[in-house]
Image: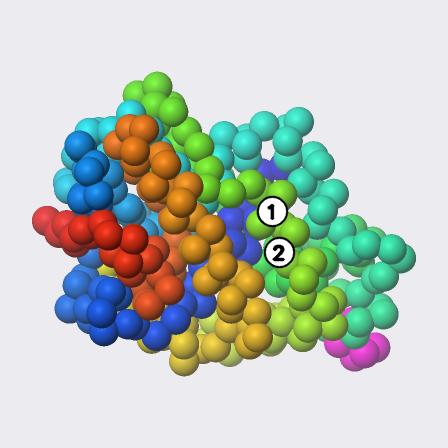
Amino acid sequence: MRRFAFSFLLLIAAVNLWAQPASAKYAPAPTDKALLWKVTGNDLEVPSYVYGTIHMIGRDDYFLTESAKKAFESVKHVAFEIDMEDMTDMSKMMPLMMKAFMVGDTTLKDLLTEEEYAQVSEHFQQAGLPMMFVDRIKPMFLSVLGSGEDMMSFNPNAESSMVSYEMEFMKMAQEREMDIDGLETAEFQMSMFDSIPYSVQAKMLMEAINAEGGGATDQFDEMVKLYKDQDIYAMQSMMDEEGGIAGYEDLLLVRRNRNWIPIMEEAMKQRPTFFAVGAGHLGGEEGVIALLREAGYTVEPLVD
């Protein structure tokens, strides 16, 4: 289950970084290098906070600023994209795992050429995943399920492992007995990918496999560097250059951001909240920061 939960976070990470061009009126300026943003105004008595995460990062690269720690400790409620406690609940994860499979009797053999299928088979066998296991899994999920030895060996207790910001925040929240919520459900996130044809997902899978030998690690390292610099504008620019899922950005990012705003507003009215969402959701004219400003809130970057 740990491998599934980790791969699910990687899949959402890929989606979260497909961002939109910045708006001159509401979007953060290129010089606003911050992951933590304070939300005030609209009759809020106490500030709430929005923090941009990178869903997975090397343990040695993980950091949390003093401002972020203070902001987190000032509230009693944390909200993630999904309720992270669900990711450790077997009764909720089992049905979710079933949604990773393609509907009907479709298999990868139906979506790939013989040459591509042989390449995919070799790739996953090297990752310790036999084709009899992966043959009916949705290609988009597979694109991260076998993405690298370090990632696949994820262990939150291992010193050399990858770290999930969401898992770290969840542990901090549990230690402080904070209320934990999600802006949407894991079931909803999984269902989004059903709107993308399997043939398109299969192309993504092949691109992901081919990229592993051609600079994918360098791209990830550069993204981590930009994240540590808190440069959300440069992160967006990098992802714009790399491209995303053409034609599906509205489904996977924009509509979700807009759906979150009324939920965030209701949460902030009830009590100050720390929102931890992918950094790719923050910037741009359809990003969370711009949409909150458009709704009348004052949203300011906080840097140490």
Q: Position of residue 86 (x, y in %)?
A: 55, 32
* Of residues 3 and 153, the one drawn nearer to the viewer in this rendering: 3
Judging from the image, what secondary structure is the residue with disc 2 in?
helix
How far apart in space, not on screen, are marks 1 and 2 (Cα)? 6 Å
Instruction: In the displayed orientation, state which residue is furthest to the right.
Output: 105
2 versus 136 height, above or below:
above
> In the image, what residue type sits under mark 1?
Phe
Q: Position of residue 259 (x, y in %)?
A: 47, 51
Q: Is 292 part of what is drawn in magenta?
A: no
Q: Which residue is mark 1?
A: 188
Camera sees residue 218: no
Residue at (65% x, 51% y) in the render: 191
Q: Position of residue 203 (x, y in %)?
A: 67, 75
Q: Looking at the image, can residue 24 be seen?
A: yes
At a point 50% along the width and 30% down the height, the residue shown is: 85
> What is the magenta range?
113-117
The quarter of the picture where residue 71 lies is: top left
Residue at label 2?
192
Left or right of 20, for residue 196: right
Q: What residue lies at 18% left-to-right and 51% top-to-bottom? A: 298
